[in-house]
Amino acid sequence: MRLLYLLNISNPGRLSADSGFTFADLLTPALADAGVDVTVAAPAPAGDARVGFAPVLSPSTKYRARLDPGLDELVNLVRRTRPEVVVANQIEATPAIRAALLEAGTDARIAAYCHYLPFSFTGNSDLELDPSLDDGGLGRSVLLAFAAGLAACDRVLVHSATAASWTTAAADRMGVELAEKLHVVPAPRDECLVRDPADTVPPDGRAVAVYNHRLYAHYGTARFTALARRLTAEAPVELMVMDLFGTRSPERVRLDPSPEQHRDALAALPGVTIASDRGDRVRYRDLLAGAHFGIAPFRPGCPWSMSVVDCQGMGLPVIAPRTGWLAEHIDDDLLFDTDDEAVRIAARLATDSEFYQVHAKRAHASTSDFTPAAVAARYLEAIA
């Protein structure tokens, strides 16, 4: 099988903070192991030496990635690579990909991975636009582009049962029939971020919690900041907050300055340390190894989180709001509805060694189906 993997990189200045790039870097070698002839079209190469690389420019903004797919470049790329399957990691681009295939004279299948859902659902099943894609009122246009992408695909891949349910519900509302083309394929874990839970040392009355998520406002960082104040004041907990982006470009800061604003607000809190992996995965692993548990993001309708899986693979329990995929994936004992509950769970992890060790083992076990080889097998089954 000749597979063309179209990878949009949203953070070209810090690839380690780009989950789509990490996904491709882990998955494509496993696909090559399975005998697939893979070419990654991206601003930077992903995978190993067996994975082909077709350099393309990175869109300058998240809106260009969704609304300006570059049809001329797509046609030329298809003609050069002659794929049997095209994987699009920006689903809004799939109508343009379909047009490019027609122009290039090929009947390749299109599979799109819904890495990011531009909507969420409330507890009352109301669809809400993602505020991060609603600048200038563009949210509904992006949602319609997402629906057009669903319609143009032969296969639609999502991370989780939660994401499948939401994607189906959104498609139904917009008159798109998904039928048998929707498949759940989880993201691969990073085998370099896997540690035997027997090597996880429980805290001795005081714990270090890590928050290793992007600090965008739409990730619920203001809610996390409010919880951080309470955790450090009311529980035997210190917080390590990851600065995953470092210095962003002026263009990206102008579009959304919230990461810098939230980073500064968190840095001012007592008991909170801002840490950076400086784009080094080994350093990132060492930072996780120095923590005792993780805290999930407060992003509404979270369909999946690579950073949560990073912690769990290292044997770190993760506490989380009871929402979205988090409620599907994380042990019920570690889910909370209120900050009072979150403080109690954190305090118990810090002081109850038996409770901690049980959940360290469960966290590690929850990632066992996410090995790159297992995910590649499910991926190939889905796109066949």
Image (tube, helix red, strand yellow):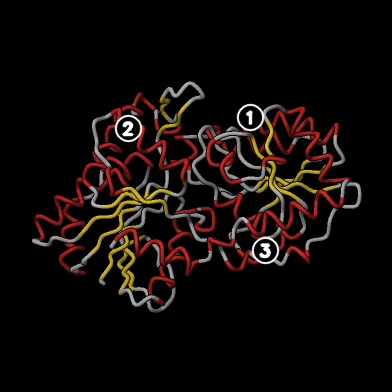
Residue carrying label 1: 222
In the rendered image, which quarter is residue 192 located in? bottom right
If you read the primary sequence from the N terminus, does the residue marked by circle 1 or circle 3 appear first?
Answer: 1
Q: Which residue is most to the front?
A: 180
Viewer-side residue, 330 vs 87: 330
**In x, y percent, where is residue 23?**
46, 59
- Identify residue for label 3: 283
Mark 3 or 2, which is nearer the eye?
Answer: 2
Mark 3–mark 2 distance (CA, rounded to whole Å): 37 Å
- Classed neighbour count for the residue bearing mark 2: other residues with Cα under 10 Å, few (<14), some (14–19), many (≥20): many
Near-viewer residue (217 or 227): 227
Q: Who's the residue at 58% across and 68% down the image?
A: 191
Q: Amino acid at mark 3?
A: Arg
Rendered-image quadrant of the C terminus: bottom left
Residue 235 in percent (x, y) is at 85, 36
Q: Residue at x 69, y 42 (%)?
A: 319
Quadrant for residue 143, please give it.
top left
Q: Which residue carries the number 2 mark?
A: 143
Left or right: where does residue 328 sit relative to residue 315?
Answer: left
For the residues marked 2 and 1, what is the alpha-carbon distance in whole angstroms? 25 Å
Image position of 298 with respect to 50: above or below: above
| Residue 340 percent location from the top left of the image | 77, 27
Q: Residue at x 31, y 51 (%)?
A: 112
Give the secondary structure at mark 1: helix
In the rendered structure, which amino acid carries the disc numbered 1? Answer: Ala
Query: Dot 3: what SS?
Result: helix
User: Vertically, is 248 above or below 198?
Assistant: above
Q: Earlier in the sequence, mark 2 or mark 1?
A: 2
